[in-house]
């Protein structure tokens, strides 16, 4: 498991609490630890536990602010603040959102002498609506490939009739990552029908169709919607996926047809190498089958 927390230089200041480490339950993933003081396990023997605060940065995602170490001595828990906590700030962006932390109970936080909400947290509060905040967090989960954590948030928004192109995309993306391709297709179809589909939704729709081996449906869709792509990179991705999947399913005529089309449609140099590789792969298969 990737280590996501860096060590702290110890400072002499310490605070005590009567409970032991056994009172801590390391069973809460990072998103559910948001806006809480937490203890985090350390791998090194005798290193105690990391102690800090988990919050959400709209620009950087889930973040851990290091306060210091949490150790048990003589049957009591002790917070040893880091030197950096005294002279500045030490933070860590969290990539592994499934990492398990132990939320420090409010009563323990109070006895440690910390405010229920740190003063600095107001710097990270957003003026966005609660729906937008929830969607932003789900997007970060998707980006970190923790779509299993994003799905409940996205479905809650969807069930509350919240509809935006970003919601449609994030929900379809999560379903595709989790290989629920039929559900992804249903979501993207709704977005397209309601005219709430952007390039990302179009791309996810193609991906859902192709992963269900619906090559004919994918062809009809891209023929009708190629002009609707506003970004060449997403159109190129959809076309290359169509070529690759049809070739993989031994539909050579389809692959060659769209290989010719992509050469006409996509002119940017950044895609030419991938297009050439696709062509070489199709041709090599032809040579092998002779």
Image: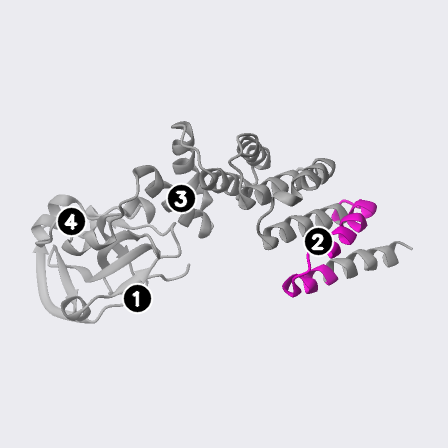
Write down the region rendered in magenta: 248-276
Return the residue at label 1.
Answer: 6
Mark 3–mark 1 distance (CA, rounded to whole Å):
26 Å
Q: Nearer the viewer, residue 226 or 113?
A: 226
Q: Residues within 10 Å of mark 1 (few under 14, many from 20)?
A: few
Q: Residue at x 26, y 53 (%)?
A: 54
Q: Earlier in the sequence, mark 1 or mark 4?
A: 1
Q: Residues within 10 Å of mark 2 (few under 14, many from 20)?
A: some
Mark 4–mark 3 distance (CA, rounded to whole Å):
23 Å
- Residue 156: x and y in percent read 39, 32
User: 134 above or below 289?
Assistant: above
Describe the element under mark 3 as helix, strand or loop. helix
Return the residue at label 3.
Answer: 138
User: 273 above or below 97?
Assistant: below
Q: Which label belongs to residue 265?
A: 2
Mark 1–mark 4 distance (CA, rounded to whole Å):
23 Å
């Amino acid at each position: 498991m990737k280590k996501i927390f860096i060590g702290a230089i110890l400072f002499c200041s310490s605070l005590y609490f009567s409970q032991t480490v056994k009172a801590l339950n390391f069973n809460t993933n990072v998103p559910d630890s948001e806006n809480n003081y937490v203890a985090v396990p350390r791998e090194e023997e005798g290193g105690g536990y990391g102690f800090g605060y988990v919050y959400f940065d709209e620009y950087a995602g889930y973040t851990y602010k290091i306060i210091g170490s949490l150790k048990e001595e003589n049957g009591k828990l002790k917070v040893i603040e880091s030197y950096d906590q005294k002279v500045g700030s030490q933070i860590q962006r969290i990539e592994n959102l499934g990492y398990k932390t132990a939320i420090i109970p409010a009563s323990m936080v109070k006895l440690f002498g910390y405010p229920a909400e740190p003063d600095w947290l107001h710097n990270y509060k957003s003026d966005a609506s609660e729906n937008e905040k929830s969607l932003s967090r789900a997007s970060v989960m998707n980006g970190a490939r923790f779509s299993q954590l994003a799905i409940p948030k996205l479905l809650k928004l969807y069930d509350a009739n919240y509809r935006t192109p970003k919601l449609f995309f994030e929900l379809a993306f999560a379903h595709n990552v989790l290989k629920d391709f039929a559900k992804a297709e249903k979501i993207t179809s709704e977005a397209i029908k309601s005219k709430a589909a952007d390039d990302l939704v179009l791309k996810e729709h193609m991906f859902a169709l192709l992963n269900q081996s619906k090559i004919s449906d994918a062809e009809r869709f891209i023929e009708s919607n190629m002009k609707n792509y506003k970004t060449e990179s997403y159109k190129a991705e959809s076309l290359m996926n169509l070529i690759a999947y049809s070739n993989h399913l031994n539909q050579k005529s389809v692959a060659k047809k769209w290989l010719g089309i992509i050469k006409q449609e996509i002119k940017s140099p950044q895609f030419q190498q991938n297009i050439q590789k696709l062509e070489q792969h199709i041709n090599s298969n032809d040579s092998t089958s002779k």
